[in-house]
Amino acid sequence: MNLIFSLLLIAIATYASYLISEKQIRCTLQSKWFVLAQHPTLTRIGALLLFSIAVFLLIQHYGVSIGFASFWVLASPLIFFFILYINPLKSTQKS
């Protein structure tokens, strides 16, 4: 259960960090998540807190070294797939 909860916390924190990034903040101000863009410092602190809670849950379940490593094992593919989902992959080659 800690593993699934940690994965969910990592996903939420990653998405919140994306919404307040420099390239996305203008679009976020016009969306339903405008509150996050109005307070970017609090959003960053909240995302850091969510990441910290995820690490704490994993450390509590697996131990310090394996818990910390498992955070990166969970976060890396999640962030990679999130980047692939957000950025449209278009072919630049013309036939």
Image (tube, rainbow, N blue to C red):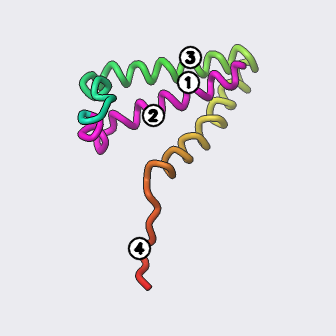
- The region drawn magenta spans 1-28
Q: Secondary structure at mark 2?
A: helix
Q: Position of 82 compared to 18: left or right?
A: right
- In the picture of the structure, the residue carrying the numbered disc 1 is 9
Q: Position of 86 compared to 57: left or right?
A: left
Comes first in the chain, label 2 or label 3? 2
Which residue is the extreme one toward the bottom? 95
- In magenta segment, residue 41: no
- Residue at point 24% right, 39% down? 26
Q: Secondary structure at mark 3?
A: helix
Q: Is residue 92 above or below residue 44?
A: below
- In the picture of the structure, the residue carrying the numbered disc 2 is 15
Mark 1 vs mark 3: in front: 1
- In the picture of the structure, the residue carrying the numbered disc 4 is 92
Quarter residue 41 falls in: top left
Distance from disc 3 to disc 4, alpha carbons, whole Å, reads 41 Å
Tell me whether the residue at label 1 lies in contact with that at label 3, contact meaning CB atoms closer than 8 angstroms: yes
Q: Could you tell me the amino acid type at mark 2?
A: Tyr
- In the picture of the structure, the residue carrying the numbered disc 3 is 53
Q: Could you tell me the amino acid type at mark 3?
A: Ile
Comes first in the chain, label 3 or label 4? 3
Depth check, front residue: 10 or 86: 86
Distance from disc 2 to disc 3, alpha carbons, whole Å, reads 16 Å
Identify the mark at residue 21; answer none if there is no mark. none
- Residue at point 24% right, 33% down? 29
